């Protein structure tokens, strides 16, 4: 188990994978990374909270973190860990398995808390799935990210990204080849912005509703960070994926975001 006295170090395999991800993203799109995290948090403990819009997100965020010299441990769906070679690589790289819909979800939170306590940077998707908001804005989050922040005391930094949905469709691998070919031709711009840390200090831990309040604040911060990345698409995205369903049951009732 990681401890504060033996801080986790990213394996060489993971650092090489980050370089590979940067090359893949550079081939398919034009990556623009803005913002940063404070130097004292770069090696952790730190929680990066990202919006989830496409199956291509993990590759984009891996590349963006490499640009900013951050090597996060990613909370990823258990299905990836069952894929030959990929699963072994993810386990070796220290990523954290999340078996959604099972009792293993609680174990994933414990593993993430242990990783953060050991000085790691952990990347999470507070929405808990690829968001299905009709406008592709962050939807109402799950409380896992807030509970992780409370348990570890680590700072939460929102990481907004936009454009990955133009590379891989929602139903990938179905339609994946066509998406890649279009991306090779068009090379869409993918923007990633590391926002300002979310201040959760005024929310008392352990009182009823604290995790929900903190979750809403994290999603609000993520939304605010996303606004400047899509100034010409304030309501609905220009790129329409016909295979992407929509779900209004988890729309986040956010406060009015600031003007870009």
Image (tube, helix red, strand yellow):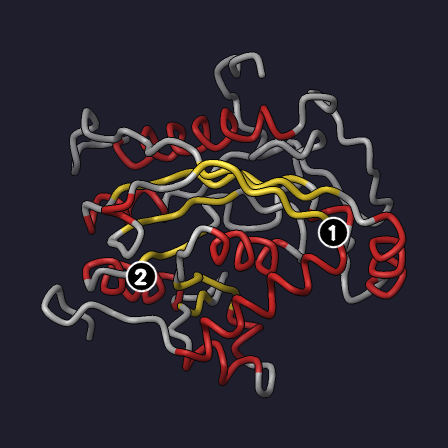
Q: Which residue has dot 2 on it? A: 112
Numbered disc 2: secondary structure? helix
Q: Categorize mark 1 by other alpha carbons within 10 Å: few (<14), some (14-19), many (20+).
A: many
User: Mark 1: which secondary structure?
Assistant: loop
What x and y, as percent, mark residue 75? Answer: 44, 61
- Residue at 55% of width from left, 67% of height from top? 19
Q: Quadrant of residue 85?
A: bottom right
Comes first in the chain, label 1 or label 2:
1
Is 41 situated above or below 252? Answer: below
Residue 24 vertical placement versus 237 (above, below): below
Q: Position of residue 121 (x, y in %)?
A: 33, 57
Please state the horizontal and vertical placement of residue 251, each as a whole percent of the image. 58, 29
The residue at the point 37 percent across, 35 percent down is: 215
* Circle number at residue 180: none
Query: Which residue carries the number 1 mark?
Result: 29
Q: Nearer the viewer, residue 133 or 233?
A: 233
Q: Is residue 51 left or right of residue 152?
A: right
Instruction: Find residue 110 and report its horizontal and vertical position in percent.
Output: 27, 63
Residue nearest the observer in this picture, 197 or 103: 197
> Which callout, 1 or 2, points to the residue nearer the camera?
1
């Amino acid at each position: 188990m990681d401890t504060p006295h033996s801080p986790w170090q990213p394996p060489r395999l993971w650092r090489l994978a980050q370089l590979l991800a940067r090359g893949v993203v550079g081939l398919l799109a034009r990556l623009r990374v803005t913002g940063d995290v404070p130097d004292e948090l770069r090696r952790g403990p730190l929680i990066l909270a990202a919006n989830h819009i496409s199956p291509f997100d993990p590759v984009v965020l891996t590349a963006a973190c490499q640009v900013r010299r951050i090597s996060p441990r990613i909370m990823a769906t258990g299905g990836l860990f069952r894929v030959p070679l990929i699963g072994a690589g993810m386990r070796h790289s220290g990523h954290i398995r999340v078996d959604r819909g099972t009792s293993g979800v609680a174990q994933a939170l414990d593993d993430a808390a242990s990783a953060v306590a050991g000085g790691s940077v952990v990347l999470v998707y507070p929405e808990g799935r690829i968001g299905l908001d009709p406008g592709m804005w962050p939807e109402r989050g799950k409380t896992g990210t807030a509970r992780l922040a409370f348990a570890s005391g680590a700072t939460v930094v929102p990481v907004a990204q936009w454009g990955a949905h133009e590379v891989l469709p929602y139903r990938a691998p179905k339609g994946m080849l066509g998406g890649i070919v279009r991306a090779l031709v068009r090379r869409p711009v993918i923007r990633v912005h590391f926002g300002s840390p979310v201040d959760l200090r005024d929310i008392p831990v352990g009182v009823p509703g604290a995790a929900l309040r903190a979750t809403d604040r994290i999603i609000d911060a993520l939304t605010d960070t996303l606004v400047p990345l899509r100034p010409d698409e304030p309501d609905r995205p220009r790129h329409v994926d016909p295979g992407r369903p929509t779900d209004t049951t988890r729309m986040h009732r956010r406060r009015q975001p600031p003007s870009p």
